[in-house]
Image (cartoon, coloured by chain):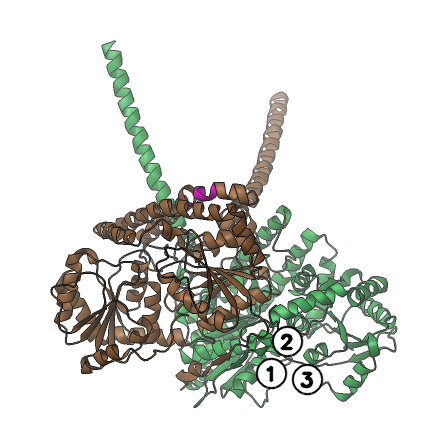
Chain colours: A green, B brown
């Protein structure tokens, strides 16, 4: 009875950027985080803003020369962390996955804690070196930036922007020990799964117990591992009482890479703005060779496989199992692959070092997406309505695929025990059982049914902060309270003391009166 | 350096409503609530929706015949509550205001509790009568509505919509014992002022203590006054365990008449959408007579005065004090006035029974707005950037004006002790001190700096719920948990018990071992 096409007709015309644009200093995070940040920067550049990107000389993906930004080389995480680190981490995670459902989250969390222990020390040293470099700081000050735009998964941008007292916008999904909301918004652990818990928002008692333990673990991690790494830096360069949390809570706008079509609904804050899937767009034509391969698949279509940007080498037996399973499909397969070619590779499978992932997922011949469960890929699968066979490897990928599985839009296999038979069975299920496709098409319709596109939202709020020199009026007053005041424990304590004192006084008076009366009675007897 | 005009250039084109529109059942609240609901209904009608309004035959403002809706007469609050009730209530509130700052909120809250005690019984009876009327219910069912759109400040629409299992959208600001957020979102009382507290979001200890007491009062009120009024109704017509709260939490979208430019920022939920000030629009030309009066004010301009829709009679001495103060102004005055003409009225003052409030506030000659602090008027003052002299009378008006005062955009006087001198002093301050105007202009710029207009937002989400037959995916899972589970008290209790048992076992074993060793030692000695 009602037009489903309505939102497709919503056209938003952001006004043109008159006069000179803003001067935006950007501290991005390398890897997949850069992929979506880059798309936002292109858009901001096209709207007339002047963009300066901080990068490492050893950056994995961030080029020094670009048509849409100027870059400044600084020392960052990449100078001391090789990408091969993640291949090693993957083997440890696979080991964790051999534990039971309850324990493996703690095992994986322990690996992340070790990573944080190393990483935050490197970050604190890099940030210190920058703040101590007076010439560098003068150069940044003289540039008179209007905004620090950063992904706070790493802390350089946060510290630098705060030190320079710049208005701050986060392009964020992960921060410190968890998903961004846990830093900002009340997060009842009774129904908000802690990151890496692989829990539902409807948990049984054991689930809630596990969630509480993981939450307490993250609190301890924050105080014993992360905060100490920065204490010297804050003592030297910031007012007393400053810590990572106080800087994060002072950010003006959080552009959060979340859409509740995908994530579990939970409390939020007025300065959190949702841009989940903002990097997705209608598919552009594919390169000629790839297009020809897609077309050659006929009625059966194509399976697309990618494991993202971080992990380059799967264990050999996993690769072989997948290759031989692919060989038995009537579909063709496009596989983003780095490393030694699997011996069992079929004629139907094309290996490629790079693919235009958004465009190939939006191609009409694409039937399924074999994916590691990174956030970018999940939103692209939802946007284009392609069912997913998940092979989670690291970090949030387990949670991401778990959410899609709960919604009936994905099936998940584990790298720890992958056989050709299991993989083929799961893949055929995703390809042949129509429920996966219809469920992800439903998510796709909901995800696209927005008043404004997530990209327009991101651009609007970034410019809002430049235009209004911040957004302090959207920041909750509770952020500046000590934890015991925030939770009204001081009020409760005083109230209890006052009530206690009153009770004591009443009891005391009664006892005195009783004794006197007893004595009188004794006398009169 | 950056164009402030940008957001003014944002043009949103909501798609046309193709085919037949939705069938919307509306249960509005009379008085000022109807004023803004009516504007939304006009818009929805213009987009092709079919609107049916439930109203009382004794309605104060809701006409039975309309070009944009069909009405159905039912028994509602107005059948048993005369508008003059609020004039009496005003006198009691003025009495409360004579108490100190700490006590008066409790005094006023007590008056509201009495009102609830009476009102909710009437509402429960009306709702019961409707549900028992099989013919009436059949008529509603046969109409095959797609949506219940209601203002849940009163409960008829909520109960009826839930009973008919209709998707539900709230046009809401107040619900049961408080502001809508308190029902839905985590609300730390350490920085979120409870309604009618007249507190800041930055409170001292005494403020937080008062806030906690008022919060506990509202919880008691909900359980002892409001819930019991409906228990029979729910037992008879709804599944076991249903209460007002469970129905409210099941609503699909809450269009909340809030903008954080005006309200204090605080936690929120994904299905709360902000439409504060959605009824405001650019000023339309005034009626000729009024326009001539406005122009005749010359450089001094005009003071606009209105006390809203509910209270019609101020105490005589207050009216006279104001009239004589107005008479001494160089400005002209337009006064929305009902009742006996004040004897001290000056030549510069025009009394009028009705005024196009939005249009007159947007008139270039308007210099100040003397207002009671109702929400509609406050947003109109902000939208048009007119400084306010507040004379709060009832309900949320004290809180509303308090917020505007904190932001330096209003001055507030009290009806309990108003003299001509005080009123004139305050009025001259608002007219002559440029800070009020510049502060409210600042709020106005921020309020207008939105990606989409609040009205487009309201229309989009209303149609979203029709289109998607609800918005269950935006509803948090925590809403269905019992309170002790929600707060993880069961997990904490079991954890404490397990730890306690472990400690007890360890202590027990140690004691047994110690005794045995003591005995052996005694033997061996």
Percent position of residue B363, x then y:
29, 78
Residue, disc 3 = A284
**Horizontal placement of B306 versus A196: left or right?**
left
For residue A262, what is the image quadrant?
bottom right
Q: Which sits in the foreground, A112 or A263?
A: A263
Q: Is residue A369 magenta?
A: no
Percent position of residue A214, x then y:
59, 54
For residue A18, what is the image quadrant?
bottom left
Q: Which sits in the foreground, B150 or A164?
A: B150
Q: What stretch is highlighted in magenta?
A: B226-231
What is the chain letter for disc 3?
A
**Relative vertical location of residue B265 with respect to residue A511 in this rendering, above or below:** below
**Horizontal placement of B376 versus A222: left or right?**
left
If the image is split into quadrants, where does the N terminus of chain B sit?
A: bottom left
Cα–Cα span, label 1 and label 3:
32 Å
**Relative vertical location of residue A490 with respect to residue A359 in this rendering, above or below:** above
Q: First in sequence, mark 1 or 3: give its number.
A: 1
The circle drawn on residue B45 is: none
Q: How crowded is mark 1: few (under 14 residues within 10 Å), some or many (20 or more)?
A: some
Cα–Cα span, label 2 and label 1:
14 Å
What is the chain letter for disc 1?
A
Do marks 3 and 2 both belong to one polypeptide chain? yes
Examine the residues drawn in magenta and state their main secondary structure.
helix
Residue, disc 1 = A57
């Amino acid at each position: 009875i009602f037009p489903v096409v309505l939102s497709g007709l919503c056209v938003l015309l952001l006004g043109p950027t008159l006069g000179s644009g803003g001067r935006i200093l950007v501290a991005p995070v390398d890897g997949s985080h850069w992929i979506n940040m880059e798309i936002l920067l292109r858009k901001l550049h096209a709207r007339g803003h002047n963009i300066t990107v901080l990068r490492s000389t050893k950056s994995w993906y961030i080029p020094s020369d670009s048509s849409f930004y100027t870059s400044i080389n600084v020392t960052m995480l990449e100078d001391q962390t090789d990408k091969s680190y993640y291949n090693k981490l993957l083997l440890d995670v696979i080991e964790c996955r051999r534990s039971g459902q309850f324990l493996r989250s703690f095992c994986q969390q322990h690996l992340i804690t070790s990573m944080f222990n190393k990483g935050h020390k490197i970050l604190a040293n890099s940030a210190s070196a920058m703040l101590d470099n007076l010439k560098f700081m003068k150069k940044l000050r003289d540039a008179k930036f209007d905004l620090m735009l950063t992904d706070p998964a790493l802390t350089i941008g946060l510290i630098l922007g705060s030190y320079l007292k710049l208005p701050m916008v986060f392009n964020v999904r992960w921060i410190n020990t968890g998903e961004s909301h846990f830093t900002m918004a009340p997060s009842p652990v009774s129904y908000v799964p802690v990151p890496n818990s692989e829990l539902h928002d409807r948990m049984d008692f054991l689930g809630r117990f596990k969630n509480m333990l993981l939450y307490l673990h993250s609190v301890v991690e924050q105080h014993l591992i992360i905060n100490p790494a920065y204490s010297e830096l804050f003592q030297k360069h910031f007012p007393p009482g400053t810590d990572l949390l106080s800087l994060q809570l002072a950010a003006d706008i959080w552009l959060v890479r979340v859409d509740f079509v995908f994530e579990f609904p939970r409390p939020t804050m007025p300065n959190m703005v949702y841009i989940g899937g903002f990097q997705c767009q209608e598919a552009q034509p594919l390169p000629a060779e790839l297009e020809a391969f897609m077309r050659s698949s006929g009625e059966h279509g194509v399976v697309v496989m990618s494991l993202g940007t971080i992990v380059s080498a799967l264990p050999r037996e996993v690769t072989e199992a997948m290759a031989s399973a692919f060989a038995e499909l009537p579909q063709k397969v496009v596989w983003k692959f780095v490393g030694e070619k699997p011996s069992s590779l079929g004629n139907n499978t094309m290996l490629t070092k790079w693919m235009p992932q958004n465009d190939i997922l939006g191609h009409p011949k694409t039937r399924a997406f074999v994916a590691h469960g990174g956030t970018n890929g999940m939103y692209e699968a939802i946007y284009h309505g392609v069912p997913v066979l998940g092979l989670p490897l690291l970090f949030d990928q387990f949670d991401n695929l778990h959410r899609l599985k709960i919604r009936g839009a994905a099936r998940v296999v584990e790298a720890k025990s992958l056989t050709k038979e299991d993989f083929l069975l799961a893949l055929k299920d995703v390809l042949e059982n129509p429920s996966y496709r219809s469920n992800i098409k439903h998510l796709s319709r909901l995800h696209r049914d927005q008043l404004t596109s997530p990209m327009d939202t991101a651009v609007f709020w970034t410019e809002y902060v430049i235009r209004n020199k911040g957004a302090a009026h959207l920041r909750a007053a509770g952020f500046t309270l000590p934890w015991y005041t925030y939770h009204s424990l001081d009020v409760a304590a005083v109230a209890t003391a006052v009530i206690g004192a009153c009770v004591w006084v009443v009891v005391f008076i009664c006892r005195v009166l009783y004794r006197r009366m007893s004595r009188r009675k004794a006398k009169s007897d």
